[in-house]
Image (cartoon, coloured by chain):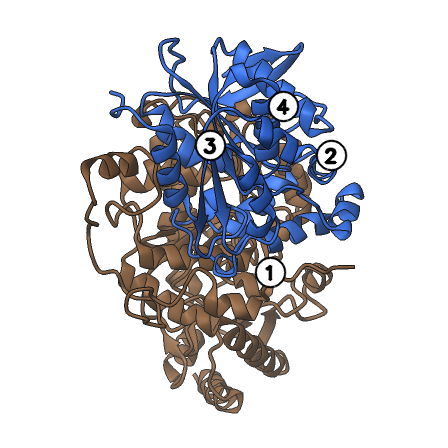
Amino acid sequence: MQLRVAGKDVYAYTGTRAHEPARPTALFVHGAGNDHSVFALQSRHFAWHGWNVLAVDLPGHGRSAGPALADVPAIADWIAAVVAAAGAHEAVLVGHSLGSLAALECAARHPQSVAKLALLGPAVPMTVSDDLLAAAARNDHVAYELINGWSYGPGSQLGGNRNPGVWMLGNAMRLMERTHDGVLSTGLLACHRYAGGLAAAAAVRCPALVVMGERDVMAPPRNARALIEALKDVRSLTLPGSGHSLMIEQPDAVLDALRRFIGVAVPAA
Amino acid sequence: MTKPRTHQFDTLSLHAGSRPDPVTGARATPIYQTASFVFPDTDHAAALFNMERAGYVYSRIANPTCAVLEERISALEGGAGAIATASGQAALHLAIVTLLSAGSHIVASRSLYGGSHNLLDYTLPRFGIETTFVDPRDIDAWRAAIRPTTRLLFGETLGNPRLEVLDIPQVAALAHDHGLPLLVDSTFTTPWLIRPFEHGADLVFHSATKFLSGHGVVIGGLLVDSGAFDWNADATRAKFPSLTEPYAGFHDMVFAEESTTAAFLLRARREGIRDFGACMAPTTAFQILQGIETLPVRMARHVENARAIVDFLREHPLVAAVGYPGLPDHPDHALAQKLLPRGCGAVFSFDLRGTREQGRRFIEALRLFSHLANVGDAKSLVIHPASTTHFRMSADDLLRAGITEGTIRLSIGLEDPSDLIEDLSRALYAAGKA
């Protein structure tokens, strides 16, 4: 689906389903250097189980026009604008990594737009190593290699994908390589500089879910503890063995957690 | 400065895609010899069919043993993913039918394996897909052959049987300038000698029957996608409707929306493997995995032995010419040094002086070399291309492919090279007496 937000083209994957106003909306927000396709399985499932799905490409990513937004509050405002542009009254937000911070901030700033909040691989603060920031600033391929090395759990580094025939590290590398110069750096800096996470969490009124990867070194579970404590209505889950790429490494566990939290209708015809 | 840490080629050859079995602890990859997989409940079953969950339904579409092999070759090639097929021919066919329809056109090297040539020159035209064959060394010929209907450029890393080295960077750049992908057959080279994606190729396939499995015991193919080609770019979108437009055969799925990087693989699996059905058997995948575990050490020895045999033959008075890009007098020697620094493989041809009868005597006098139609076995092999692998080609086409009545093709195995040289010496002596 193509949308117009603030005068710019926005792409949102819908699971090949037409938008139906009577249905609730789930909006999926990816992390830095990614696009909507990292949620392919989970977003498609909701699209075929009673939900309008908007798995967006953030500005400057994938098929959405740039430039990339420079900070988390700006992305949060943009998410609320996407919800409105799609004609939805409110949406369940599912965010991963940078997308989780933006969804969190959106729930605090635009509570009327957010029905529930699912945060995958969040951390507050979400500090990024100086070496990775420097490599990304240079648009150096090393940045992608560092991310791949840190984003998958030890088991996943040698594969064993639940999705047959796809080499997780290679596929992730190709996706990051498609980002335009400066986009990854902008996203990582947005994570690194975001200081409003705990205040946002305290302001959130809707139910929240936090899903963490036990072996996540990009956003270690210990860095989500304060966030979980600050959220009022929260349930949390740690996926054993998973790294930061939860939706890819353990797609069924993530989907089942989302199903329990969000709820699904009977399969669409 | 923190340095990225990734597993190296030899380690990936042994481990990529596999983990010890979580239930039994089996260290080797189990052979999942089953047609189907039990669904936990009806909703789960529906979600698997509709690509909402990852997993297994039916072994024609995907199988856990085959999936380990698919990940392993992807890791070794530096690709995004792969599909295991019934044969190398099935892999080539799958690549073509995933991208092309009636009315489409291919530009291909004319120095191809005879089976590939048959498919392109004789069979596919019956389905409305035409191919123009060009001298792989002539970039102007590649360029001139591209038509508005062209959808694919195709060549072999090392041409069969004369070992023309495909200038992948140059041909890939030409393809990309025209919004087209480059498909490369890397059977002779394997990723141990060259990783075509690093030079610009978009798709790679192998007859895994050859060096990957390495022992001449199975038939299998592998089709690997780099994941780098942008099917949805402005210059390509209209050329590849199979990936960029709704597919009625899967609930109007648009594969390039479903997966940014693996759209080709999705369509190939959800249509090509589903409908044409040329899948790999799990036991075959297991045997190829066993072969790949030792690929690095085998390829090193294959290349070392081949070089010893090349050096012997080029000095022999009954040998008119040896075509091996590792030799300074080969037209592609400089390119080979650039693209194939570890060596030029273990399959090559030489021209015997003398008559057809002398050629026959040579082949029949060999004792260690097996006379058969295959390459890439641990055992050394020999064949006469003009009367076997390339026999359907016309005399002119044979000449253009550099094949004469005296051309003999060898696949050098892992025997002690002194024994191979002794075998060749005796056979050449017998040929000289004929």
Q: Amino acid at mark 2?
A: Thr
Q: Mark number for residue A129?
A: none
- Protein chain holding label 2: A
Q: Amino acid at mark 4?
A: Ala
Mark 4: give few (<14), some (14-19) or many (20+) Cα within 10 Å: many
Please, is residue B203 above or below residue B114 in the view?
above
- Percent position of residue B246, x then y: 40, 21
Q: Amino acid at mark 3?
A: Asp
Mark 1: give few (<14), some (14-19) or many (20+) Cα within 10 Å: many
Discs 4/1, front: 4
> Any idea which chain is the blue one in this picture?
A
Q: Is residue B284 left or right of residue A214?
A: left
Marks 4, 1 in one chain: no
> Any idea which chain is the brown one in this picture?
B
Please tell me whether mark 2 sits on a helix, a strand or a loop.
helix
> Which residue in the structure is indicated by mark 4?
A76
- Percent position of residue B378, x then y: 42, 77
Q: Is residue A36 visible?
A: yes
Discs 1/2, front: 2
> Which residue in the structure is indicated by mark 1?
B194
Q: Mark number for residue A186?
A: 2
